[in-house]
Amino acid sequence: MMMPVADVPPPTTRAIVQGIVDSVLAAPMWRNARWGMLIVDAERGDTLVSHDADRLFMPASNQKLLTGAIALQRLGPDFRWRTPVLLHGVQRGTTFHGDLLVLGSGDPSISDALRGGRAASAFDGVADALAARGITRLRGRIVPVGDALPGLTTGYGWAYDDFDYGYSAAVDELVLNEGELSLRVRAGTKPGARVQVERAPTRRYPPLAVEAITRDSVVTPGAPRPPRLEAVYDSIGHTLVLRGTLAVGDSARLTVAYRHPSDAFVAALGEALAGRAIAVQARALVRRDTAGRAPDTLTVIESAPFADVLRRMQKPSQNQIAELLFRTAALVTTGSGSADSAQAVGARTLAEWGITSADAAYRDGSGLSRHDYLTPRAVVRVLDAMRRSPWAALYRESLPVAGVDGTIGNRMRGTPAQGNAQAKTGTLDKTRALSGYVTTADGRLVLFSLLANNFTVPTREVERVQDLLVSTLAGRSLAAPAAVTPR
């Protein structure tokens, strides 16, 4: 006679996800790694998984989750940067004797990415305004004025040997093209010929010394490897030196950072005016041309909408925009855009969300600093604060979408998380982070923060764990499963 068998419920989503976490933590490959995890049912507040959720981890670009939230809270979704351009001098006929003054406040949107592929379009209004006054020659200089973002142009604790890379470009009151210069290099027609170089968005700045030459396209077996093509600044950071070799018929594109952001901006504005037949003949002011005269506002350059700027920061994880949001939130709140003021404003805003100095060390806006630290709980609290915000949709829509775009555009494809999970990555040496939002199969919103530090396995192994947890949540229901009676 068969004995009755009790109903055996299938495992809950919580149990499955916890099982994944337990197996990861028990695996020998993670013995030297640190994992911090917190997964929460947003509406019910139930914790699904928690592991070292109150310990500090280096977040890398997960820091931008805080920066974006703080900027949105302090600036509002309708905020735009305004850059007044003023004339200081006197006009005689078609010549203006004096300076063109530019009063910057850190507009991050004067870039190819946010200006339809042409950063210099931001200067069209300046040229139009000069032309409307009949000015075809400026006998003076283009001068940056003001000190809205005082102090260092790089973040606290940034690696000095990364300063020439675009992702570590400096910031200032005036920034061009997210701090990046592109070099398009073409080989000569025969070995030994000097290579040809085109710069953009500035065509003549910074000064360029071309030492690179063309080599034969055939490499002799056993011969030393040809010197690689590279662009580096000289010892004083003034002249960019292009050196190395490029094979006949080849071309290459290099990206380097502008060492002096305001100088790059000034150069680009001067080139844009020259392109409209307005000559800038840089020379010192003559006292009689400016004596007793107040500057006259010529025009104001207005930024792209805040929503576009926020999206451009979060989707590709753009560091310079993050630093400018970090500083701008402080400038608008306190009148000072210094890094110290930005840290204070950030800490005060986080405290409003229940995040103390024990939960977060907020030292820069981008997460490039290795002095930034966050707990997974702090990250989840920020996500939850934004979920409750009037601008929740704007905040979430700015984040990369799994399998669709941004830094997770190639991750979680073909899983229930594709087109569903909205999350921010974080990447530094020995650091990988993934935090954001995902909706379960039964429509429940889940907040998650998955931080990994100090691992020595390939980074793809870290991402595999993160992706498995998020896609598992996306593919399952959080509701308690019905009991199943074995037959």
Image (cartoon, rainbow, N blue to C red):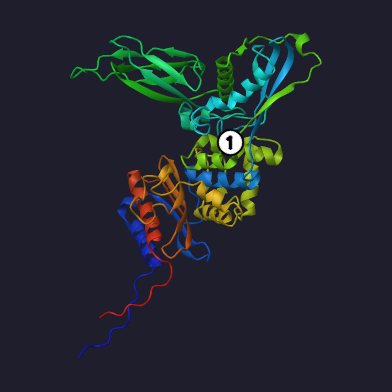
Q: Position of residue 101 (x, y in %)?
A: 68, 21
Within 10 angstroms of label 1, few (less than 14), some, or many (20 or more) residues?
some
Q: In the picture provided, is 422 more to the left or to the right than 125?
A: left
Q: Which quarter of the picture shows residue 4?
A: bottom left
In this view, the residue in front, 100 or 71, is 100
Local SS, label 1: loop
Q: Which quarter of the picture shows residue 211?
A: top left
Q: Is residue 155 visible?
A: yes
How many tags in the picture?
1
Q: The N terminus appears in which quarter of the rendering?
A: bottom left
Q: Position of residue 203 (x, y in %)?
A: 49, 17
Q: Mark 1 — residue?
A: 304
Q: In the picture provided, is 95 more to the left or to the right than 157?
A: right
Instruction: Please determine whether, in this image, residue 287 is positioned above or below residue 431.
Output: above
Instruction: Please determine whether, in this image, residue 206 is positioned above or below residue 443.
Output: above
Q: Position of residue 149 (x, y in %)?
A: 64, 31
Farthest residue in the left direction?
221
In this view, the residue in front, 266 or 328, is 266
Q: In the picture provided, is 277 more to the left or to the right than 290?
A: left
Q: Which residue type does callout 1 highlight?
A: Ala
Identified at 30% across, 80% down, the residue is 485
Q: The C terminus appears in which quarter of the rendering?
A: bottom left
Q: Position of residue 7 (x, y in %)?
A: 33, 81
Q: Which quarter of the picture shows residue 472?
A: bottom left
Instruction: Please determine whether, in this image, residue 151 is positioned above or below residue 235.
Output: below
